[in-house]
Image (spheres, helix red, strand yellow):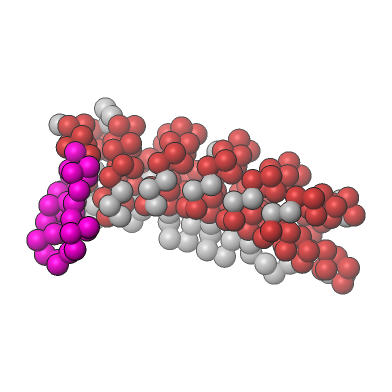
Amino acid sequence: MLKKTKCMVEELYESSQKGCASILTTLIQRDALILREVSLTSLKDTPLHIAALHGHLEFCRLLLSKKPTFAKDVDALGRTPLHLASAEGHIKIVQALLQENTDVCLASNRDERIPLHLAAIRGRIEIVKELISARPESIKVNLNGESVLHLCVQYNQLDALKLLVESASGDELFLNSKDHNGNSKLHLAMLTIYLLPHHQTLTLSQQPSCKRFVLLLDILQLLI
């Protein structure tokens, strides 16, 4: 790679961290092929990965308009920009990425997690809604024998669990699925909410709140 081009690529990555869309525009005006030069570097992250991670919406939109294939590129950990935006809770960026390509909803990272898994375990409710609306079948993608429902229970994300159970209403096979230990999400929910306080010394602020109990009852009603 020519020294001049290398410097421009470095400037491109710096601007992606800062979210400076005006610099990106200037770089593209100076070299219309600058975004293609990224594939010639040893870097695994694309500028879209970095911008999506940091929540730079306008920068992401501009990148997608100039090189939409960035949406499906993966980094060293197998993550697409949608993985990163979903985990960090950047809903506008998630929406922009889904407008470009919904197939990435089903893309697994190196840990076999899809964007929905990351959003669910972080409790990103609005993003979970966007992802299952774009690709409803993503809710059935398993992770090492565990469904997204099991992940919600394991990470104590009951709001996400309720939403996903409601979304899967009528699919008894999925709702009654078991993990590799033979536990259904209902078993895990009961263990998490009721048994954990009896086996650990927790502070008062860590005790299950009334809201959590009410939420669990709502979930149980959906399962009955």
Outermost residue, left side: 198
Residue 200 appearing in the image? yes
Residue at point 67% right, 60% down? 17
Residue 122 appears left or right of 65: left
Residue 149 appears left or right of 88: left
Residue at point 52% right, 63% down? 77
Residue 101 image point, x, y percent: 60, 39
Please say if 133 is above or below 194: above
Near-viewer residue (7 or 202): 202
Magenta residues? 186-214
| Magenta-colored stretch includes residue 206 | yes
- The main secondary structure of the magenta stretch is helix
Residue 130 appears left or right of 21: left
Please say if 162 is above or below 19: above
Report which quarter residue 166 is drawn in: top left
Report which quarter residue 162 is drawn in: top left
Residue 147 appearing in the image? no
Near-viewer residue (92 or 152): 92
Near-viewer residue (198 or 76): 198
Outermost residue, top side: 170
Residue at point 33% right, 36% down? 163
| Magenta-colored stretch includes residue 22 | no
Please say if 166 is above or below 11: above
Residue 168 image point, x, y percent: 31, 33
Residue at point 11% right, 64% down? 199
